Amino acid sequence: MSFLPLVRLWIWISVFATVAGWTLSVLGQLNRIGYGLFFCLGGSAIWFGRKAWAPEWGKQVFCRRRLQLRFRRALPLAFIFLALLILLGGVLYPPSNHTALTYRTPRVLQWLAQGHWFWIHTSNYRMNDRACGIEWLSAPLLLFTHSDRSLFLLNFFPFLLLPGLLFSLFSRLGVRGRVAWMWMWLLPTGYTFLLQAGSTANDTFATAYALAAVEFASRAWNTRRQSDLWHSLLAAALLTGAKASNLPLLLPWFVVIFPLLIRTKIQLLFEESGFKNQLSILQGRKVTAVLMLALAVLVSFVPTALLNVRYCGDWSGLALERTGMEMKNPLVGIWGNTFLFLLDNLVPPFLPGAGWWNQNALSILPQAIVRPMVANFESSFHWLGELPTEDWVGIGFGLSWLIILALCGALLTRTAGSAACVRQDALPFRLRRTVMIAGWAALLAYCVKSGMSTGARLISPYYPFLFPLLLAGAKQGKVIRTRWWRIACWIVIGLAIPVVVLTPGRPLWPANTILSHFHQRYPNQRLITRALNVYSIYGKRADPLASIRSCLPHDIRVVGFMGRGDDPDISLWRPFGQRRVEHLLVTDSAVEIRRRGIEYIVAGEINFGLNGATFEGWKQQTGVELVKTANATVRVSEGPQPWYIVRLIQ
């Protein structure tokens, strides 16, 4: 269990980054001095109390012989190879995740510029009502490095923890050891995990929190140590603090943790030989319990929920969200989300006909399916991409068909073989079954509430809790020994490699050079033209308004930004730490704009149309002069769009 100190370290890094963010915001000291003092005090407290927090803290994490034995085998070597490809892509390319560029990184820059969290005056509601987990981890990196190049590490490090956590979860829930060992290396090859591990997305990094919460709660059943309980509690809180859509995942954690808290009939129902509880795990150390509960509340979604109530009257923030985010009909949510999960995960990873599907899907699908989904889901629910990208893909084609084949193989296996081998410290049988069912119940709760179109991506932390119920039993032990299974596993690995290499945001091949050459030779070939366009746009995605920024005076310290809610302002912040971006609405008066110290404004043409206005009308109303008009591409599907640089006449 040498990976556990690394898991604990990651939990405490996350806790202290989040606590520092909220605490320094209250004090108005979200700056280098504030962070320096906070981490010195916090680091000292953790160091001197390390034995109390984790009795195994001092154990050797890396054993050379153990690592050599482990990585002589093919599947661990394949995982390491994929991890190196991911690391290479993260180092070579700046972050290009659209949602990170649109609101997550800019909102952190806004807070750092003001020295505290605040409700930002903007049309991009996501800068205000969304959970702040990965943002508080990003804040010190942005503050001290003045760069976003290292932010991918916030996804890469939790990705490396997945195999150990997956093996522990699966084996504690009754999956045979050899089956759990194979799937601990296979499940991280899901496309969502591979692609987000090298990006600044915020869907998969919380998977480590979800697994750690159940892992430490399960350990507490054997050790009866409060330190395991506290790590479980903090991990569960961090899970909700990462994303509100993770809230249903508290169910499997609660099933494990609740019987530990108090000696009741429920606990006696789950107890078996070897799990007799002499004393309640919560006896004694009441001060520590209060402190841990306070930390858990602070790093959870609770602070964001309270701020949402304060500023928009809705704890979830759904009052601000666009149509389709919240499910209207729960029954449609169940079968509709199931349809979308299957659609996104079972389609081939390379789909040249995606454009045709996106244009015609609503007309060729049965209207009995289309009409309810149009009424309950976001408008782009049927959309697919030619290549898997971190913006929409789930575990993907390879793993989805592999688990289907594994289930079919188990059904065709006539004899169950020997009794399932369960590790000595596995959870009691009734509790194991309840936890496995709770994982599916959590997904059901998500389906009932969410109408978002990219559900396969959003449920990334849910996937590990869906597999144990499918893999438990002795038959899977026979399936993994067959020749066809081994071939299927290597097909899955083989498909995962080009997914990482070809991803448009971080291509590990000379995409533009090769595609430009073929475009010159075959100028009328539609697929080549489309591919060249996609890779070219993604190459500029990290700095989409660079041409606009170059037209601004270099010495200005504040620039106004007037764009729609999905337009990124990240280009105007670069280089970080030298300029502040102030968001403006079409309805803002010239007096208000002057009061905020804004002289130059960057405005997008599309934003005026969405607000029922025109640039000329707004120009006359506010008394600005046009400095320059330039085109920039924010979305591949829209192509170049006009942007205006204006100066406020004094």
Image (cartoon, rainbow, N blue to C red):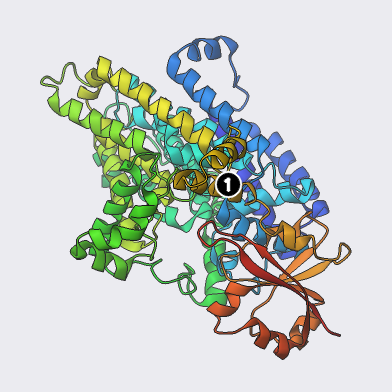
Label 1 crowd (10 A; few <14 / some 14-19 / many >=20):
few
Query: Is residue 526 placed above or below 514 in the rendered structure?
Result: below
Q: Is residue 90 visible?
A: yes
What count of labels does the image hold? 1
Q: Residue furthest right?
A: 555
Element assignment for label 1: helix
Query: Is residue 626 placed above or below 362 in the rendered structure?
Result: below
Task: Name the residue rendered at 16%, 17% in the picture.
Answer: 417
Q: Mark 1 points at which residue?
A: 288
Quarter of the figure with the C terminus:
bottom right
In-image side of 123 versus 333 (left or right): right
Q: Looking at the picture, which amino acid does disc 1 mark?
A: Thr
Query: Is residue 42 placed above or below 105 in the rendered structure?
Result: above
Quarter location, residue 336: bottom left
Residue 428 image position (x, y, % from top left): 28, 32
**Between 497 and 529, which is closer to the camera in this rendering?**
529
Residue 105 image position (x, y, % from top left): 65, 55
Query: Is residue 611 placed above or below 297 in the rendered structure?
Result: below
Q: Which residue lies furthest to the left in this view?
A: 414
Task: Name the residue rendered at 35%, 54% in the picture.
Answer: 356
Task: Name the residue rendered at 27%, 52% in the picture.
Answer: 338
**Between 244 and 253, which is closer to the camera in this rendering?**
244
In-image side of 578 versus 158 (left or right): right
Residue 281 image position (x, y, % from top left): 44, 40
Task: Name the residue rendered at 75%, 85% in the picture.
Answer: 592
**Between 140 and 605, which is closer to the camera in this rendering?**
605
Quarter location, residue 135: bottom right
Q: Is residue 225 visible?
A: no
Quarter location, residue 187: top left
In-image side of 504 versus 13 (left or right): left
Q: Which residue lies furthest to the bottom in this view?
A: 621
